[in-house]
Amino acid sequence: MQIGNFQWMKSVNKSTILNVIRLHEPISRAEIAKLTKLTPPTVTNIVGELLEAKLVVESKRGDSTGGRKPILLTINPGAYHLIGLNAGITQISAVTATLDGKITGEAQIQVPPQVTADDYIELLVQAVEAVKAKSEARSYLGIGVGMAGLIDRDRGVLVYGLKLNFRDVPIKAALEARFGIPVELENDVRALALAESWFGQGQNIPNFVCISVGTGIGAGIVLDQKVYHGSFFTAGELGHVTIDYDGPQCKCGNRGCLDMFVSKQAVIRRTRQAIEEGRVSVLTEWLENGKAADLTYELIYSAADAGDPLALDILKATGGYLGTALTNLIHMLSPQRIILCGSVIRHGEHVVSSLIDTVEAKAFGQALEKLTIVVSTLGPNAVAIGGFTLLLQKLYTPSGIGDV
Amino acid sequence: MQIGNFQWMKSVNKSTILNVIRLHEPISRAEIAKLTKLTPPTVTNIVGELLEAKLVVESKRGDSTGGRKPILLTINPGAYHLIGLNAGITQISAVTATLDGKITGEAQIQVPPQVTADDYIELLVQAVEAVKAKSEARSYLGIGVGMAGLIDRDRGVLVYGLKLNFRDVPIKAALEARFGIPVELENDVRALALAESWFGQGQNIPNFVCISVGTGIGAGIVLDQKVYHGSFFTAGELGHVTIDYDGPQCKCGNRGCLDMFVSKQAVIRRTRQAIEEGRVSVLTEWLENGKAADLTYELIYSAADAGDPLALDILKATGGYLGTALTNLIHMLSPQRIILCGSVIRHGEHVVSSLIDTVEAKAFGQALEKLTIVVSTLGPNAVAIGGFTLLLQKLYTPSGIGDV
DNA sequence: TGTCTTTTTTTATTTTGTTATTTTTTTTTA
DNA sequence: TAAAAAAAAATAACAAAATAAAAAAAGACA
């Protein structure tokens, strides 16, 4: 139950001002007062504390508009640094960044197929050490981790997932004990959504959904500018949405799950099946004359790029299935934007175009008119960016500033 | 951009205290201080203002626990009254209620098939007059309206819907001009969800979805205790979710929409089709010997109650389709609870049981374990209750109290 | 140079919550 | 039964932080 007292009031104003500086830098005290409707003395007072905490610096003088030149304020990028991790199944990647979200270094570590939870934590530590070694930053505000699996955001625990045998792994506690700085843990797709919200295509979009299509399919849902978790952090399971009432059996027990149609493996399976059924394709040649060792997703989209009709059909159908699932989502949640990410999207112009065609054909009304579908531009570090954004989010939230 | 100032701080505390009184009445000042962590003088001070505004009354003395007996406070039910409307296609129903949500009177007005928007507003006015005439309340806090169609909640405008030719009808402005008290307008299913959240099965459930199945299918989504609208108020279009990729053509242009399987009309259509195909059913007799004029939904569930295998099959299949759609929703949003409402549910034990069976078979993981599916207990006035709850919501929100 | 503008800081005031104290009322206990 | 203890509520003094008014600083321009 939030109650109003002086500390809280000040804390709200402090975070408001810090956010305004972040979003409008470089900006003068007078301009902040105008934007926030706070009075100039209040702004001066709070900016003083932010300067003292080294979160903000006075940069240059601005241009005069007929009077004294304003002293422009910016976020102090150098004082504190952030560490973001993308903790994946086969690879851990780490980045360091400044307070304004600029990446200053990166490092990768491969994960062997068979590891215990303790091994994995040790690999996370190595990744942090590796990226720290490459950076000359001294003071770190914390470590933010995006991780595949069911994550208890509040406790910082991997409940299950990532590797099959992992159960209740206290990632946050382990890393905090090791490094003595705050650690935040979040599901990878939701970290991605957070990254889009702060630095990508989700900026200034209150309601959007980030769809990640790769080995699995997940949705990161942002509603009213906040990442939505659902009860017990299980929202966004797009992969097991039914799109065909009488479709093929999925390993989850249901029929016609989206996962059976559009994951990387599903695309490969459907292509193989079509070839076995005798459909003509350049892929048959490539495989037979040893030009390709095995049927991979990369091979299929190469064939599609080369104009192979089977590969094109498969990828278009993939977009169609995905588009159908997204149309359902659009009618239920009516997001302003859908952001597509993941390896299938990054190498899948055919999938994306057919997806957009499908949505435009199937969705209707205002929900469609107000909608834009875009492809993520954050690149392969997106989840790690989301990781350190968890720290920024805390910093820029009331009562998150005093701790610095 | 919310900034902290004294009025806001006080307003937050005032609404906090008013809410605590509502939820824990009868309660003493000392107890409020303990619950809210506000200090006793602050509570005394604010309670004084609430007493003066007649929103709260000192009722009896409580039992002593070894010292002075506490003065117990309750919401003043008599000082202000509320009006709630369910503005439907064929009928408008109105209720009056006290500040604690007790209904004190009701009235109904039938809507002729052909009316203009102006006629309809006049009928709304008549409904309000009729219910006011039946109540001896003097002072009304406002009118809250739940209405079928696309509602712009902010402006209080019916954008389209209800009757086919209605476009941009300024309901709020019209009623405010007529009665001189605040009017709030909301979509009917979302009003329903709000009613459940305050007075029904959604109490203390942060994330739930209210499914209404009748002539159409809609979902009212409550996330983090707030009714979710989506971009441009179009969230919750459950009726046109695809559940069968190659299903029958819907009037919206897509194939296999849920609406084609589970609305009242769809149930009738599917039953008629089965009869025409020669399936044996008691319904055939009832219709042939003139015992029933026409095939209606009521007739079908009577037959199911009488054990008719065709009717049972149809209703069970209906539950199956609905359950499939809900499973998708559950995997996407992971709500803690699903509340079923509407006429098909109220007279559909067979539908509900098959729906629950389907969800339990198809959903999996934490999303299922943490989920409960219940039937609404608010009765036929639910939307009207949601209507006046719009006013309560405003009243119990910071800066909504000063206006009284 | 002098006046006008704009930005920033200073001073005094106001709002409102907090701490400490007092009053009122009741129960407990000697 | 009277004194002590305890709880609830009210009052007084205090403090935090915003606001209002005014002053100072710094520059523009005639």
Image (cartoon, coloured by chain):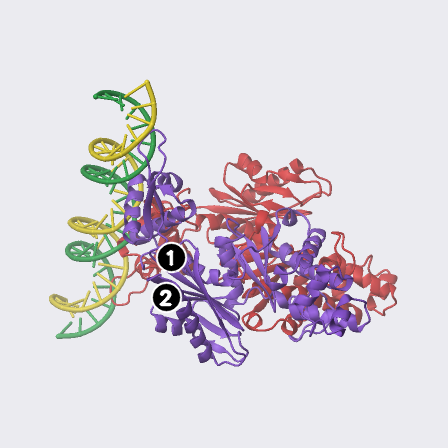
Chain colours: A purple, B red, C green, D yellow
Q: Indicate the chain on which mark 2 is placed.
A: A
Disc 1 residue type?
Leu
Q: Which of marks 2 and 1 is nearer the N terminus?
A: 2
- Residue A371: x %, y % from top left: 62, 49
Q: What element carries label 2?
A: loop
Percent of width and height locating residue A110: 50, 73
Q: Is residue B224 left or right of residue B42?
A: right
Are the residues at dot 2 and dot 1 in contact (C-beta closer than 8 Å)?
Answer: no
Q: The N terminus of chain A lies in which quarter of the figure?
A: bottom left
Instruction: Inspect the image, locate mark 2, and give the three-letter code of the amino acid beneath it.
Output: Pro
Viewer-proximal residue among B124 and B368: B368
* Left/right of residue A277 with respect to residue A65 in the rendered view: right
**Where's the C terminus of chain A, which quadrant?**
bottom left
Mark drawn on residue A395:
1
Residue B152 percent location from the top left of the image = 58, 44
Instruction: Read off the residue under disc 2.
Output: A182
Q: Which of B259 and B104 is in front in this view?
A: B259
Q: Quadrant of residue B318?
A: bottom right
